[in-house]
Image: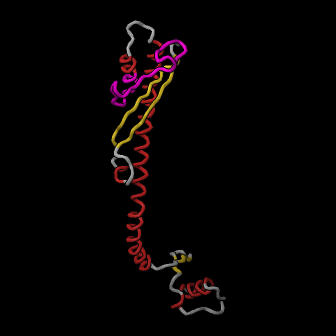
Amino acid sequence: MNREATKLLACSLALGGSQEKVPPAAACRWPAFTESGHIIMKTRSTRNIRRRRRREAGAVAVEFALVLPIFLALVLGIAEMGRAFNIQVSLSEAARQASRYAAVHCSEPGYSQTNAQASGVAAAPSVPLTNANIAISYTGTGSCADGNDVSVSVSYTTPWMTGFPNMIPGMPASLTIQGKGVMRCGA
């Protein structure tokens, strides 16, 4: 059997025919053969693939344009949330440290609230705090006596890091974060 007959027979079998009924050569353009005679089935011509790629190039650009804003909002939101969490942890540590200092050193003769506030500022090096950001109050009799609690509240207002939330209607122009620490006096 010659090569052309082999092609037609393979085409006939691939199209669901039998060995006796061989279709004309025009109906069997899609099977290709390697040098060793193995059949390679082509499902689309190269020209159709090129046309399809050109059509899909515009679709990819449209998909990218639709997904990009959502992706950017997600990434910028993660960055803002991470920064806010970092500031919150720092403020909580500053409040804890200031309340600890006030509770332990309040009975000493040289104690002042300014010293407790300074220890709170030193405990949060990643946030530019001042003594004005730290408020100290006492429960019970209003002084740091045994059995009373010292309560420290640290508040810090910062602008948004990326500026992205400013573009959303109803979002505040800045972020206010608070930390609180309470400790028993005389501890």
Residue 112 lies, with reference to residue 2, above or below; the image says above
Magenta-drawn stretch contains 121: yes
Residue placed at 51% from the left, 75% from the top?
Answer: 34
Residue placed at 38% from the left, 14% from the top?
Answer: 112
Q: Main secondary structure of the magenta part?
A: loop
Residue 28 at what x, y percent from top left? 54, 87
Nearer to us in this view, 128 or 38: 128
Residue 56 at what x, y percent from top left? 41, 72
Residue 42 at what x, y percent from top left? 51, 77
Quadrant of residue 67 within the rendered picture: bottom left
Nearer to us in this view, 80 or 97: 97
| Side (left or right) of 21 relative to 35 | right
| Side (left or right) of 179 relative to 166 | right
Magenta-drawn stretch contains 187: no
Residue placed at 51% from the left, 91% from the top?
Answer: 26
Residue 186 lies, with reference to residue 57, above or below; the image says above
Residue placed at 41% from the left, 53% from the top?
Answer: 73
Residue at far top of view: 109
Q: Tell me where the magenta segment starts and ends, as one range.
A: 120-148
Nearer to us in this view, 84 or 166: 166
Nearer to us in this view, 109 or 162: 109
Quadrant location of the N terminus?
Answer: bottom right
Residue 38 lies, with reference to residue 132, above or below; the image says below
Q: How many marks?
A: 0
Quadrant of residue 64 within the rendered picture: bottom left
Residue at far front of view: 141
Q: Indicate how the structure is coloured in the image.
A: secondary structure
